[in-house]
Image (cartoon, rainbow, N blue to C red):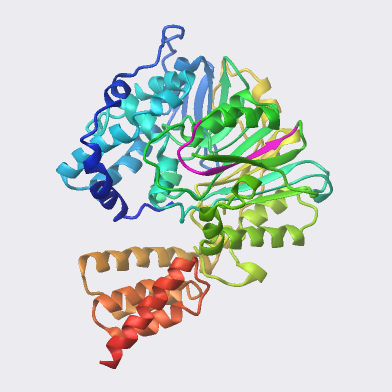
Amino acid sequence: MNIKKRMIPRFLCYLALPFLLISCGISKSLKDVPDLSAYNSDITQRIQLSDTTFVAGESFLTKNKQRLWEFYVTGDPLERGLLTGHLTQELFHTQEHVFLSKVNELVPSKTKQNLLRKFLAWFNRKMYLHVPEEYKAEIYGLSRYASDTYNHIADPYLRILYLHGAHDIGHALQDLALVGCSSFAAWGDKTEDGSLIIGRNFDFYAGDDFAKEKIIAFTAPNQGHKFMSVTWGGMIGVVSGMNEHGLTVSINAGKSKIPLIAKTPISIVTREILQYASTIEEAVAIAKKRQVFVSESIFVGSAKDKKAILIEVSPKNFGVYEVPNSNQLICSNHFQSKPYANDKKNKAHIKESHSQYRYERMQELLHQSPKLTPKIAVDILRNKEGLANKEIGYGNEKALNQLLAHHAIVFKPEQRLVWVSSNPYQLGEFVGYDLNKIFKNSYKNAKNTTLADPHLTIEKDSFQYTTAYKNYERYRQLKDTISTAINTKKSLSPDILKNIQDSNPEYWKAYFIAGRYYEQQKNYIAALRAFQQAITKEITTFQDQQKIESYIKKLKRKVKK
């Protein structure tokens, strides 16, 4: 999810000022602190064994050979939060900086930053009522290790609590159009051995630095089920994970209105499901009792039920989708259950976004591989082509592999096996973990312990060694260069404009951004030519198509003058 520079200032200008006049309810939320009296606040000091291994009692953090951080933590809620902050503090500070340094970039004015701080307090004024006390205690412990750099935004505890809604508010501010997560499951006669297999891409993009330090967390809470999840520093919520009973969760953003008040962050709902549910019925019951503030599909797989379903939640609706007469379930970014059948926003999203296109591409690829295996699931997640294997340009959001994902993951719940992608994107090795072994072992004397099972590793994608991949990375650099030139009205060498098109020749955006530059430079003939080339490519959304057509129409008038 790429945060657009214009969105936050505009959002503040139109919405925040009136809210500053309303103070009712804010004071209570600012003063709320979880009850910690029942928890242990004494934790073992961390011992650094190497540059990449830290130990504190039974909990530890280490980096494996694929450069993924593996983190094991146990204890009561406060202990877990304190140990998480203590052991991962450098990663925590890095991720907090990645997120919050954007504030200075997007809102450089101190006056507007103060406005933003007040708006956040107003917007999140009810969140504390919708987050379970257990997780508030864990977040409180974690926040003791937060950086002091961003205290002007909010106090550490409130700030980290707010950040757990970053996924929700981030895609809501962009009207949910640019989130492209893709998920699928197969079981019974659709898999090689009849076992349930689930694959998903988590395409949440907050800059390249955001995905550099992934954490594979293994949590052994004093209450509830043990579970693993893919996360990052400062995050106790779950976006992708599996528990010791073989129940899995992952989230796919849906279409909804921009919310006016925060309630339960979706990652907290899925965390609660993972920790306290072992069946689909239990997962549905937990989701039903929580109030969310954006629309989301929760993809749930169950070893006990031997199938997968979708829990589709939104502020004013709730649905459960079970695929009829099939052993295959597919999810992109639109809803499929009956309660949303007549939802106008959902219908428009299917028609105008890239969600339906990716849905059909998953159908196509699963049909080509009638007996799914974990390796085939990885191949599908890595797929970069469009329908019928059409070349649509690298980075196109219509592709399953948009070359920007934070992570990809494959579950085999009945065997408690999971595979997690390593950098770059989904192209590195998929590292395998056996939860049966991991949660059976004791780690009282853990030293340089890796939790990965090398026998499960799925090999790298050779695409990363091709000229096409090098050209794609070059395209991304050139795109940033041209975007900066457009924003600063700087002149560029004609070679740069040619090179961006040559580096990713099938991608419409390579021509679109060149057209925008030429148009700003008043080179209308070159701009028209670039937009006319862009319109011949596979355009991502209906809105993008309209935008290009509008440029062409306008430029034709200018050229005729």
Magenta segment? 291-303
Q: Position of residue 425 (x, y in %)?
A: 52, 52
The foreground one among 335 and 83 is: 335
Horizontal side of residue 56 vs 276, given as left or right: left
Q: Residue at x 56, y 57 (%)?
A: 347
Q: Position of residue 527 (x, y in %)?
A: 33, 81
Seen as rendered, the residue at the extreme bottom is 560
Q: Quadrant of residue 93?
A: top left
Question: Above or below — where is 83 with respect to 472?
Answer: above
Seen as rendered, the residue at the extreme top is: 37
Residue 307 vs residue 347, the one in the foreground: 347
Q: How many marks?
A: 0
Instruction: Tell me residue 209's x, y (percent).
Output: 39, 47
In the picture, measured across the screen, residue 21 lies left or right of residue 63, that is: left
Extreme residue toward the front, this view: 342
| Residue drawn at x 76%, y 60% as measured from the top left | 367
Q: Quadrant of the C terminus?
A: bottom left
Residue 476 pos. (x, y %): 40, 63
The residue at the point 35 percent across, 77 percent down is 515
Q: Is residue 449 visible?
A: no
Pick the front one: 479 or 77? 77
Residue 294 belongs to magenta span: yes
Asked whether residue 173 is drawn in magenta, I would say: no
Position of 517 with respect to 205 (left or right) is: left
Residue at the image position 27 percent from the left and 45 percent from the top: 15
Name the residue nearer the viewer: 204 or 343: 343
Q: Is residue 73 above or below residue 62?
A: above
Q: Is residue 227 visible?
A: yes
